[in-house]
Image (cartoon, helix red, strand yellow):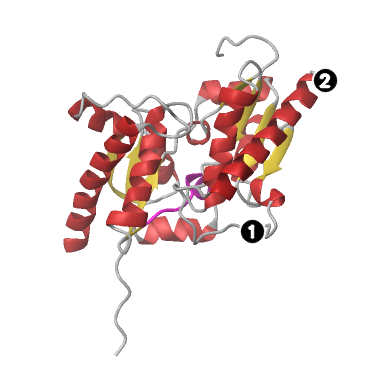
Amino acid sequence: MVNLPEKKVGVVSCSGEGCVEGTISRIATRLVLEKFRPENTVTICLPLFLAGGKEERAFAKEYPTITVDGCNKSCAKIGTERHSGKVASSIVVTDLTDSRECVRSKSKRKLAEEDLSLAERVAEKIAQEVDRILNLGR
Amino acid sequence: MKTAPPRKVMVIPCSGIGKPLGSVSREAVYELIENIRKHNTETVCLALLVCGDKEALRLVRENKCIAVDGCSMQCAEKNLKHVGGNVVASFRVVDALKQNRKLKPKSVTFLDSDGLELATVLASQVARKVDEILSK
């Protein structure tokens, strides 16, 4: 088991290569780790987790996790719960958009300003969930 | 007379989120599918595949696949093989890094110039493999 201090939340992003919302979920997760809650969060590499990563699966069993999915197929949530039990919270990027659907026609790597803004909003929501789970009362 | 649709090669990155190598794998694949081989390549969400989505599984079983992994854990290749994907080649960012030692990508969220350059180099290598596969 990886040696981690107490009071950490694992944030698991979908890989989401197929639509821009997957890239947004990934960027939002990194923003939480680097900017919003660096002291309270770690990330788990979903492909490694799904490929059988023992430390990743053990972490997700022992510590609370938040999954961040690009679309309502919720692969990060399904994969995490399949191998490590119920997640503490789950967020779906398209739930925060007007269309509530994946946009497949857009570039998945060159994010428009509104996509970056959405990534910030998703990151803020993840940070709120981290505070709630850890009872930080910010 | 109808022309046959172009043949496609599926190119699947690991998209690892913990290190710059995963971001480079993802960027290299987007360089292929959105730019240098956009008519001959396609990608699919790796997690969707592992979760058993029927259409995603059909795509990787009926088409030839290239795995593009960041590190030696080779999660994209392992997961593709696990679901019965037709893997015909695999690349690793860490190998491209060894061939281009002057490049030292550091950022994960938004790739720095070294990360972008490494992705471009790797995309060219994968593009040559795509051409080789489609020429057979």
Taking the image as shown, residue A110 lies to the left or right of residue B104, namely: right
Residue B51 shows in this picture: no
Q: Which region is colored magenta?
A: B42-50
Q: Residue drawn 41% across and 53% down? A: B43
Give the image location of residue B114, x and y in percent: 30, 30
Q: Residue drawn 70% across and 14% down? A: A7
Give the image location of residue B36, x and y in percent: 27, 55
Q: Nearer the viewer, mark 1 or mark 2?
A: 2
- Judge whether residue A16 is colored magenta: no
Q: Secondary structure at mark 1?
A: loop
Taking the image as shown, residue A53 lies to the left or right of residue A134, namely: left
Give the image location of residue B111, x and y in percent: 40, 34
Pick out the residue farthest to the bottom: B1
Chain letter behind tag 2: A
Looking at the rendered structure, the kind of residue marked 1 is Glu
- Judge whether residue B44 is colored magenta: yes
Q: Secondary structure at mark 2?
A: loop
Q: Is residue A82 positioned above or below A34 on the image?
A: below
Closer to the N terminus: mark 1 or mark 2? 1
Residue marked by disc 2:
A137
Q: Residue drawn 30% across and 62% down? A: B40
Q: Quadrant of residue A24?
A: top right
Q: Nearer the viewer, residue A20 or B53?
A: A20
Characterize the local packing of mark 2: few (<14), some (14-19) or many (20 or more) Cα atoms within 10 angstroms: few
Characterize the local packing of mark 1: few (<14), some (14-19) or many (20 or more) Cα atoms within 10 angstroms: some
Of the numbered discs in the image, which one, if any, rests on residue A101?
1
Q: Is residue B63 positioned above or below B113 on the image?
A: below
Taking the image as shown, residue A67 lies to the left or right of residue B10, namely: right
In space, the residues marked 1 and 2 are separated at their CA atoms by: 33 Å
